Image: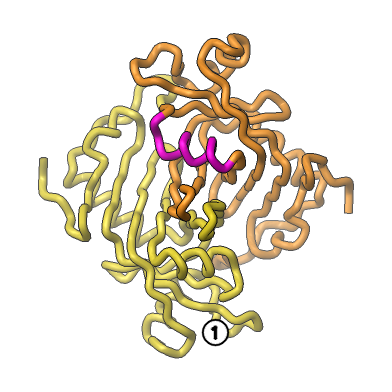
Chain colours: A orange, B yellow
Amino acid sequence: MSGEGQPAALRSRSQRVADTLERLRRDVDLWVASASEDGEAYLVPLSYHWDGSTLTISTPSASPTARNLLRAGRARVALGQTRDVVIVEGTVEAFPIGADPELEEAHARSAGFDPRTLRDEYVYLRITPQEIQAWRESNELDGRLLMRDGAWLGEQ
Amino acid sequence: MSGEGQPAALRSRSQRVADTLERLRRDVDLWVASASEDGEAYLVPLSYHWDGSTLTISTPSASPTARNLLRAGRARVALGQTRDVVIVEGTVEAFPIGADPELEEAHARSAGFDPRTLRDEYVYLRITPQEIQAWRESNELDGRLLMRDGAWLGEQ
């Protein structure tokens, strides 16, 4: 993970939390890793909505991501660049189209597409973060844990 | 995956292949998804070396990524941004430090770190692509398959 030249300056935990919240608010897409029951990994980019405490994504009900996340009940997703990483692990709950119109409307605005208007059958997946890590270069690997068991950690 | 405004212009397959090879040559990091035997997904960014036909990464032998990829014998990795995606699926072979000094030297130059100098025990993992997909916006989802069974596809 070390790059050439000088790494970026080391951030305090409170700065990392602020940067992470800003990224969750502003970004549009994240990477979703998932695994089948027999241990086959899958990885796709998806658009999301952040409501201040949970991430909502939507994907065809028949997709490997939907199947895998519903089975596992957990997701590991990444936001940002490989040198400005936010990794979120959380629990996954599914809800069908029509179950939460307000959140569905917010999702459509954030994600830039509206699964309610599409021909394929989509499902919403709501991820509640349990663990969040953030780091830029290898000098930030220490102290990368920002949330544990669903609670933001205080200043170091 | 649809963004606001106009999507980028649709690329021909030969343009996507050229852009993909350029990205493989120039980028430093990729996202590695892996899964444990009992279906738990993992996701980390790692630096890599591209030698023109295979990707070489290195990670601690005891890490979840090394364990998972060695078990599965396959990897799914992503390069680029969520709106300029390259997804590579391939077979994984491991080799220990010292087994291929020329490739290890090339890896150190490309990746910006040298596992031969580190205290933890690292392993090299060489990924031979079997399938490669590349797309930017949703208008490029059709035709995203560029390599199948290890062979680049011809013009559409």
Residue A48 is covered by the magenta coloring: no
Left or right of B107? Residue B131 is left
Which residue ends up furthest to the right in the rendered image? A155
Mark 1 surroundings: few (<14), some (14-19) or many (≥20) residues within 10 A: some
- Per the rendered image, the range of residues in magenta is A62-72
Q: Where is residue A3 in the image (x, y as percent from the top left)?
A: 56, 65
Left or right of A32? Residue A10 is right
Depth check: give the residue in front, B40 or A16. Answer: B40
Name the dominant secondary structure of the magenta segment: helix
Q: Position of residue B16 (x, y in %)?
A: 24, 45
Q: Where is residue B14 in the image (x, y as percent from the top left)?
A: 17, 46
The quarter of the image holding the C terminus of chain A is bottom right
The image quadrant that residue A136 belongs to is bottom right
Q: Where is residue A106 in the image (x, y as percent from the top left)?
A: 59, 16
* Residue drawn at x 46%, y 90% as measured from the top left: B98
Depth check: give the residue in front, B32 or A128. Answer: A128
Query: Which residue is under mark 1?
Result: B116
